[in-house]
Amino acid sequence: MTAQTTPIQKLDSEALSLDSVSLWQITRRRLFRRKSSVVGMVILAILIFIALTAQWLAPYSPTLSMLDAKPPENIGKRSAPCIYLLGCSQDQPQHIMGTDGNIRDEFSRMLYGARLSLMIGLSTVSFAIFVGTVLGALGGYFGGWIDNVIMRVMDVLLAFPSLLLAIAIVTVLGPGLINALLAIGIVSIPAYARVVRGSVLSVREMDYVSATRALGGNTYEILFKRILPNALTPLIVQGTLGIATAILDAAALSFLGLGAQPPTPEWGSMLGAERNQVFTAPHLVFYPGLAIMLTVLAFNLLGDGLRDALDPRLAHVS
């Protein structure tokens, strides 16, 4: 006689199987179940591979003119792409994406540009997250005048369009990649501070926080060991989306001549240097623009997938 499984026993077995799965396993399963986030991760993985191997993949120096190469090449400015496999004459030097206005290999500069763009996004967001987390946590935990001062400063920064404020900061500090990174990091701080403050305000009233306080836990233990680890989920999503915004802002500053300076291979500066050649040499505008679009798209898709995967209202596991 076969034993029948009751609905209550079935629910108990599902609960036990759910408890045996860690939060990160649940998040990973939800993340890989969404096609958009998988596409974003694939694009991002390709970009990371290119950034890590640019020095081996690039056939030429990203800053050296072909006239200074050994041996020097007899090639003109802004030459069209030449790929032997696609029928380009063997008499011409092969340049997969052509050459720019200074007779530098565009393909090599694009490869090294991936490394710089990812570095820009990660460094600026890391700085903004660190400062914003500290300010938001202090304001949300202590409240009172500390919270008012911090949040009013954040409100003032949010009152200005982020790109215009970044332009103003770089204008004061002077053009350059480091100053552009600092400006983008500063204008990004308020978003993370407000996210962390809101999370801290909701978490600090939880029972386990009250229990730690009743047991004599100090401020450091309560804030950084009890509250913050449970308030970082929205910060992860915001940070992933923020990397895309930082890369786009850095490209805009470089396009205006305020970010990376020549001959640094940065996609925004490459786009700005050849913006007047959109009809005579469209490949010099197309490739950097496409690279920026794909990078921003990858981080946006991944951020959207993380937001859905970390949503506590989605309790099912596939």
Image (cartoon, grey):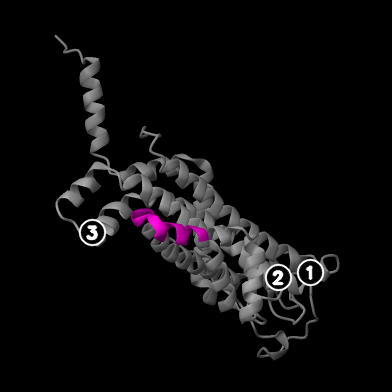
Q: Which mark is residue 61?
A: none
Cβ–Cβ below 8 Å for labels 2 and 1?
A: yes
- CA distance for labels 2 and 3: 46 Å
Q: Which of 36/90 is in front?
A: 36
Residue 211, horizontal then vertical, whole percent: 19, 46
Callout 2, which amino acid? Phe
Residue for badge 3: 221
Cβ–Cβ below 8 Å for labels 3 and 1?
A: no
Please give the range of residues in magenta.
Answer: 140-152
Q: Residues within 10 Å of mark 3 (few under 14, many from 20)?
A: some
* Quadrant in which the N terminus is drawn: top left
Label 3 vs 1, first from the N-terminus: 3
Q: Residues within 10 Å of mark 2 (few under 14, many from 20)?
A: many
Is 143 magenta? The answer is yes
Label 2 vs 1, first from the N-terminus: 2
Residue for badge 1: 275
Residue for badge 2: 255
Residue 98, horizontal then vertical, whole percent: 73, 72
Callout 3, which amino acid? Glu
- CA distance for labels 3 and 1: 54 Å
Cβ–Cβ below 8 Å for labels 2 and 3?
A: no
Q: Nearer the viewer, mark 2 or mark 3?
A: 3
Q: Which of 90/221 is in front?
A: 221
Report which quarter residue 172 is drawn in: bottom right
Residue at (36, 44) in percent of width and height = 202
- Pick out the residue farthest to the top: 1
* Quadrant in which the C terminus is drawn: top left
